[in-house]
């Protein structure tokens, strides 16, 4: 039984080697993805086969996501400990839903005493989750899965820990290896998604991550290896969108709604006389700064009651400013690094105007996920995990840690 040896590195090696012996370069695998880095609790069960950027296809066997947005919205941001509590409450129901969609609900069995003690130790900070898992086990046996992929960072650390500990518990119960996934890599893995495939493209590629918490450019010579060449010095793009949206009276997270206002202004030709800056546009680097842009909006908005047309016009000018900066910097980066494709990911990659501007400015394929898969989800974690499993890159469940500041390119 694996349980008794869970803390042992030897057993971790045996587990990983068993997994290795099952896999080859393009092996068909079933992966369970778990995402809890921020305010979405998500679980996805996929089967996948192929190589990233070449022949790759997948099928979603079960997928469930619970968004906590409504819970955090009144505070205008995400409360880490509230997010943690909600994740702990929702993981087991979501897992049940995923397994039942995948028709994997069967009779279960009770925990043996040593396994129960070990599970309790792993989930000592999530006692409610432990109790739910124990009940779950009475009606479910181990599904056929090859590995569990879990977001290990970056994100809100208390929230990340819940997913990591849940993955460690399932790994122990089901005797399957864990893949620790960088959340940002998950976003980028979705860039070329087209139906049940990732489209073919050539390396070196550039990755542009534009999310609520991160904005950075990475050079990707091969998948999944990243070299960061630039990033924001202050606010992330999504953060700036959300803060400006709030100034215009749009509740958190307002990025998508702000973009709708901007699209209306574009459609009706409504413009503002007040021009916003394009920060760091001409600087000879690949860094960004969005907090000055946000403050410039605040200066326009403060002490004024804006009518609907004025709000639309400011939304438009703001979105134009962001798009100008991103398109200009990415065009230069693509030239400098002779990139053959741009992979865009993160919540803001749902923004149709920004995608359009990037596609018009760059003369290489610009790949972005379908809008509904641009924001946080567990499919991206399962798929990113699959590519690590192909390379036999598994985490040691005994030593796996959540890391809120995890950087892209840091080995896990
Ligand atoms: O990647 P994500 O789901 O969470 C993080 O990992 O941060 O990104 C969420 C961010 C939020 O800031 C949200 O306002 C923004 O993505 N977002 C958008 C759009 N859709 C989502 N920003 C601009 N335009 C959109 N259409
Ligand atoms: Zn994200």
Image (spheres, helix red, strand yellow):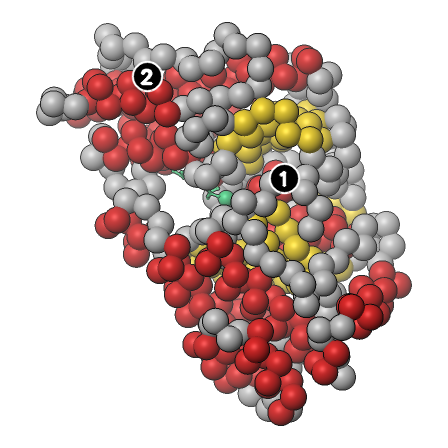
Task: Give how far across and how far down residue 92 sits, in percent.
Answer: 49, 72
Q: Residue at x 50, y 84 (%)?
A: 135
Residue 317 got which mark?
2
Q: Nearer the viewer, residue 385 or 126?
A: 126
Question: Which numbered disc covers residue 408?
Answer: 1
Q: Residues within 10 Å of mark 1 (few under 14, many from 20)?
A: many
Dot 1: element: loop
**Label 2 packing within 10 angstroms: few (<14), some (14-19), many (20+):** many
Please give the name of the residue rendered at 59% of the width and 86% of the height, measured from the top-left corner: 116
Position of residue 373 relative to residue 131, above or below, is: above
- Between 111 and 369, the one lying in front of the other is 111
Q: Position of residue 373 (x, y in %)?
A: 52, 44
**Between 116 and 305, which is closer to the camera in this rendering?**
116
Which residue is located at x 57 percent, y 19 percent?
286
- Tell me where residue 219 sits by quadrant: top right
Q: Is residue 66 left or right of residue 272?
A: right
Give coordinates of residue 342: x percent, y percent.
64, 26
Up the image or down, 248 lies above or below 5; here it is above
Q: CA distance from mark 1 to mark 2?
A: 31 Å
Using the image, tell me which numbered label, if any, was put on residue 146: none
Q: Quadrant of the N terminus?
A: bottom right
Confirm if mark 2 falls within 8 A of ligand 1: no
Q: Quadrant of ligand 1?
A: top left
């Amino acid at each position: 039984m694996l349980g008794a040896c869970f803390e042992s590195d030897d057993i971790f090696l045996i587990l990983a080697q068993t997994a290795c012996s099952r896999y080859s370069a393009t092996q068909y695998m079933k992966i369970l993805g778990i995402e809890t880095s921020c305010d979405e609790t998500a679980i996805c069960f996929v089967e996948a086969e192929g190589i990233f950027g070449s022949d790759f296809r997948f099928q979603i066997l079960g997928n469930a996501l619970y968004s906590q947005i409504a819970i955090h919205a009144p505070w205008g941001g995400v409360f880490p400990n509230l997010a943690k509590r909600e994740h702990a409450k929702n993981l087991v129901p979501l897992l049940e839903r995923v397994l039942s969609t995948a028709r994997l609900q069967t009779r279960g069995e009770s925990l043996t005493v040593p396994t129960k003690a070990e599970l309790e130790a792993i989930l000592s900070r999530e006692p409610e989750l432990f109790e739910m898992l124990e009940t779950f086990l009475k009606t479910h046996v181990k599904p056929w899965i090859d590995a569990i992929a879990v977001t290990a960072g970056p994100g809100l650390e208390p929230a990340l820990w819940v997913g990591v500990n849940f993955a460690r518990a399932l790994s122990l119960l089901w005797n399957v290896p864990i893949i620790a996934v960088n959340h940002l890599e998950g976003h980028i893995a979705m860039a070329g998604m087209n139906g049940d495939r990732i489209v073919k493209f050539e390396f070196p590629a550039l990755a542009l991550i534009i999310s609520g918490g991160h904005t950075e450019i990475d050079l990707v010579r091969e998948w999944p290896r990243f070299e960061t060449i630039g990033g924001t010095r202050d606010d992330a793009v999504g953060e700036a969108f959300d803060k400006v949206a709030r100034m215009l009276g749009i509740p958190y997270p307002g990025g998508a709604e702000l973009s709708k206002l901007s699209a209306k202004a574009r459609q009706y030709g409504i413009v503002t006389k007040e021009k916003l800056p394009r920060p760091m546009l001409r600087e000879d680097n690949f860094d960004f700064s969005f907090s000055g842009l946000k403050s410039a909006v605040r200066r326009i908005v403060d002490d004024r009651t804006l009518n609907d047309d004025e709000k639309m016009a400011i939304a438009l000018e703001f979105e134009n400013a962001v798009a100008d900066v991103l398109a200009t910097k990415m065009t230069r980066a693509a030239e400098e690094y002779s990139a053959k494709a741009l992979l865009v990911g993160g919540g803001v990659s749902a923004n149709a105007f920004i995608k359009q501007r990037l596609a018009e400015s760059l003369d290489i394929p610009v790949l972005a996920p379908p809008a509904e898969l641009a924001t946080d989800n567990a499919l991206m974690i399962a798929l990113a995990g699959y590519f690590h499993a192909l390379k036999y890159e598994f985490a040691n469940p005994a030593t796996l840690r959540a890391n809120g500041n995890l950087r892209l390119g840091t080995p896990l």
